[in-house]
Amino acid sequence: MAKKVFLAGHKGMVGNAILNELNKIEDFSVITAEKRKLDLRNQNEVINFFDNNEFDQVYLSAARVGGILANSTFPAEFIYDNLMIQTNIIQACYENKISKLLFLGSSCIYPRDCNQPMKEEYLLNGFLEKTNEPYAIAKIAGIKTCEAYNKQYGTNFFSIMPTNLYGPGDNFNLKDSHVVPGLIKKFHLAKEDKLDEVVVWGTGNPKRELMHVEDLAKACIFLMNHPNQSDLSTLINVGSGIETTIYDLAYLIKEIIEYDGELKFDVSMPDGTPRKLLDSSKILSLGWKARINLKDGIETTYNWFLNNQDFLRN
């Protein structure tokens, strides 16, 4: 009998990648819900949805996401929306005796000046990065909620902490995008408009570990269906091990897009966290590893961007 899976957030970059991977597996039946039909922030709607459907597993990838500008502009919405979404689904999973829940966290949960590479036990060992604090606080609450339910109710809820993601389906809106799609959009527009220069925020010195979203999707399914659940902890880092400076990343994207103008760094703007590299030894020890290298991943992402102009947020 096919496993029934509820995928929350299937329209987002991560959710869509998970959906694509699940659809390749014959013994999985995936249930999704459009946002206009199910507001995950509304507890009654979530309760009714779970009452009227049966699931074996739940992937919780739905979230309000965005970069530095979005977090600083909409801090209340980042906290409220994410707290409501995750709390409603976690509680519904408990009430409906869902066998397994995967909660998608973020590497921004770790302290700003965290030791590198960042281990799972470093959570709450220091101050958060201010530029994405609202989102991080909500995600930490989700992780701790899963842990509390496991402790009190014996549920099987676990959280994964992906590194910085990019790939097809990303948000390319310059007002609230992350670094890779933001740079792709900037260089693409500069090339189209024949601009003399592109300006990138910060010094270019911060380092980021980057991973293609397809690798993350495969990691999620790998962990959800690992035969020996005793090998899993409630918090698992998922990273690629591919680390680059913002400076090198910008020049790589400039090269891929074939932009001929100048590249300048605005040192008056914030850098964000100095370095973010995950210690992914737990999942690596189970036999999983990322497969897509950075240049190939950005090239496929840019090709997707070019082929989906009509569907992208401007």
Image (cartoon, helix red, strand yellow):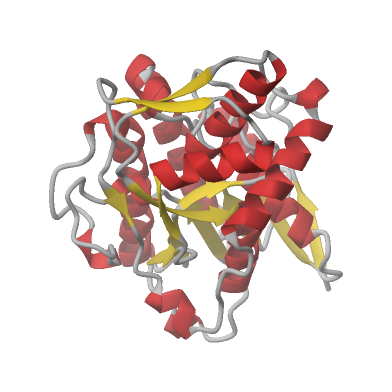
| Above or below, 78 relative to 56 | above
Residue in the image at 55% along x and 16% along y: 196
Q: Residue furthest right?
A: 26
Could you tell me residue 261's position as x and y percent? Answer: 57, 25
Q: Is residue 48 left or right of residue 228?
A: right
Could you tell me residue 66's position as x and y percent? Answer: 47, 30
| Above or below, 26 relative to 101 | below
Q: Is residue 241 left or right of residue 96?
A: left
Residue in the image at 43% along x and 40% along y: 87
Residue in the image at 39% along x and 77% along y: 281
Location of the N terminus (image quadrant):
bottom right
Q: Is residue 48 left or right of residue 90?
A: right
Q: Residue furthest left?
A: 126
Location of the C terminus (image quadrant):
top right
The image quadrant of residue 20 is bottom right
| Above or below, 247 relative to 203 | below
**Number of numbered discs present?**
0
Whether residue 54 can be seen here:
no
The image quadrant of residue 174 is top right
Q: Is residue 183 left or right of residue 22?
A: left
Whether residue 171 can be seen here:
yes
Residue in the image at 58% along x and 79% along y: 226
- Which is nearer the eye, 10 or 107? 107
- Which is nearer the eye, 139 or 168? 168
Could you tell me residue 220's position as x and y percent? Answer: 58, 63
Could you tell me residue 209's position as x and y percent? Answer: 42, 55
- Which is nearer the eye, 238 or 150? 238
The image quadrant of residue 217 is bottom right
| Above or below, 40 relative to 174 | below
